[in-house]
Amino acid sequence: MADLKIKYLKHDKINQKIWDEVIRDSYNCNVYALSAYLNITTQGKWDALVAGNYDYVMPIPVKKKFFIKVSLHPLFNQQLGIFSPHKISREIVKDFVDAIPESIKYLELKFNKFNDLSLVTKGEIIPNVNFELDLILPYQDLFKKFSANTKRNIKKALNNNIKTVFIDNKSFFNFFRYYFSKQFKGVLGKKDFTTFKKLVDFGVLKSNFTPVFLGAVNNEAKLIATAFFIKHKNKIYYIDGISSPEGKDKSAMFLIFDHIIRTYSGNNMILDFEGSNIESVARFYKGFGSMQTQYNTLIINKLGSLAKLKRK
């Protein structure tokens, strides 16, 4: 691929219709790279590296901090990187990284699991953990692979008369914002919640992807846990969720994930847990019999100690 010609396109020069066709046809397609999803999570601030006639594409989130151009991986978006219907070799990955404009003084991007960064010599590469569960088997066979702890917690929720229910986007968001703000003060700001609400509402209004909002209620029909999933092509993505103190005590989130697995089992689909580098969260996902995968974050820092200002 020595003749691979990669050009940098500003946002207004990207043909988003062709872009989405390429993403959907890519063998490594994911929902995070669709233009509609990117427009929400980056507030419309993304450019792209494009090879040939959109044969290979790579979104580049961009923003300016104190007049300095930076590229930061957006919240609520797990994996980006290079997408294509064609094979993405290590050499192509290196070519794309080398084509990142010098004007970007700090870059922190998460590449998808199909992008091999082993030839990349720029910056620092940090591995991340994800978990995926193939739902092709019948539920009974999938359940057998649950850990003893997961089975015990599902039973605990059922013994506490917890039930799962489908809820609307408004109920999900209000519950999530209230309990997330109490349990993780300062992690998400006002602008972050505004972005998340747009993402939560978008799938209800458009047909780009299908949102699934699940809740868990106690025997008084009070909501004690919620989760937001997105269904796109042959994947179900867990985007985020939260439990109230009662929901945690009664293992409500275990029942929500069991419901999703039971509902979509026996289908040619993958449940993407979105993973975590936090051991306790990773253990929760792994307990459902999921397989561990790896994707990488690339950090290129030309700012030195000023990089600490990047997300402020």
Image (cartoon, rainbow, N blue to C red):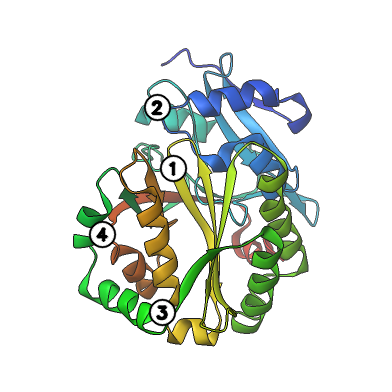
Residue tagged 1: 235
Which amino acid type corresponds to the residue marked 4 in the rendered image?
Gly
Mark 2, mark 1: which one is toward the viewer?
Answer: 1
Residue drawn where x is 49% and y is 33% of the image: 82
Q: Secondary structure at mark 1?
A: strand
Percent from the top left, x then y, of residue 219? 51, 83
Q: Secondary structure at mark 3?
A: loop
Residue 79, relative to residue 6: is it above or below?
Answer: below
Residue drawn where x is 67% and y is 55% of the image: 200
Mark 3 or mark 1: name the one nearer the start of the chain: 1
Mark 3, mark 1: which one is toward the viewer?
Answer: 3
Mark 4, mark 2: which one is toward the viewer?
Answer: 4
Which amino acid type corresponds to the residue marked 3 in the rendered image?
Ser
Q: What's the distance in space between the residues labelled 4 and 1, CA to CA?
A: 17 Å
Q: What's the distance in space between the residues labelled 4 and 2, CA to CA?
A: 29 Å
Mark 2 or mark 3: name the one nearer the start of the chain: 2
Residue tagged 2: 88
Quadrant containing the N terminus in the rendered view: top left
Q: What's the distance in space between the residues labelled 3 and 1, CA to CA?
A: 25 Å
Q: What's the distance in space between the residues labelled 2 and 3, CA to CA?
A: 42 Å
Q: Quadrant of residue 117?
A: top left
Q: What number is the disc on residue 289?
A: 4
Q: Quadrant of residue 28?
A: top left
Q: Judge the density around disc 2: few (<14), some (14-19), many (≥20) Cα neighbours within 10 Å.
A: some
Residue tagged 3: 251
Direction from residue 176 to residue 31 in the image, left or right:
left
Residue drawn where x is 41% and y is 85% of the image: 160
Q: Secondary structure at mark 4?
A: loop
Q: Is residue 274 visible?
A: yes
Which amino acid type corresponds to the residue marked 2 in the rendered image?
Ile
